[in-house]
Amino acid sequence: MLTRKQPELLVVIDRHLKATGFSPSFEEMKEALNLKSKSGIHRLISALEERGFLSRRHNRARALEVVRLPDDLASRVTGEAAVTAPAPGAAAPFAPNVIRGDFSQRLPGVKAAESAGAVQLPLYGRIAAGLPIEAMRDTSNHVEVPVSLLGAGEHYALEVAGDSMIEAGILDGDTVIIRRTETADSGQIVVALVDEGEVTLKRLRRRGASIALEPANPRHETRIFPADRVRVQGRLVGLLRQY
């Protein structure tokens, strides 16, 4: 059984999807339902997801999808669509695809950015020997990142120091976007903590009971450690560069 606001939100999302091809922003949904805060929209969307009426692709912005409508709503919406549908061959009304949303509610540790389609991630500092990620945390610095670079989970940013990953397209001074995780597949570029004291950005290779941290520059050597000496602290998911 749906509450009064839940089917109202379904109709708002369904109409917006059919008219524009993308779901409405949280602000648009809040205004359409005359709610005072976006947290109410979050609760409604979560409830509709649990009941199988909505699905959400977390690796894309504004990617809500109406899976189904309640029977009484489906017939009404279908009838309205038949009345309001444009004539065959008529151009669809222009609707700019502007991405907005309260992404801080979805991504832990992230502050919402003022510009559309972006969030602010904590910028911890330059990757350097002797500084584990926990010691590099500085909540005063943030970097604005397009939402399209992020998926589910917690993320942070680091500034690259050195040229050990240049053949992977990662240059000195670049800002890398890291998804916080303690696991990684062989071949992925990770933030690795060695001996609880040295942090490095390298490609991880598993070799039996050992782990190789592989650079992407022939001037640097691959380093091999027993697995218990290396702890993954994140996986590379994106890169920012300023010219």
Image: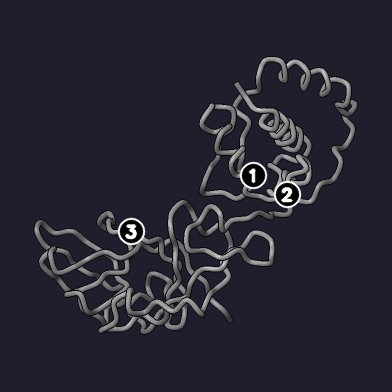
As helix, strand or loop, the secondary structure at mark 1 comes to helix
Taking 137 as reference, is 207 above or below it? above
Q: Earlier in the sequence, mark 2 or mark 3?
A: 2
Q: Quadrant of residue 46?
A: top right
* Residue receiving disc 2: 36
Q: Residues within 10 Å of mark 2 (few under 14, many from 20)?
A: few
* Residue receiving disc 3: 181
As helix, strand or loop, the secondary structure at mark 3 comes to loop
Q: 27 or 238, which is in the foreground?
A: 27
Q: 215 or 139, which is in the foreground?
A: 139
Residue displayed at 37% across by 61% down: 180
**Picture quarter with the C terminus:** bottom right
**Picture quarter with the N terminus:** top right
Three-letter code, disc 3? Thr
Q: CA distance from mark 2 to mark 3?
A: 36 Å
Three-letter code, disc 1? Gly
Residue displayed at 29% across by 76% down: 132
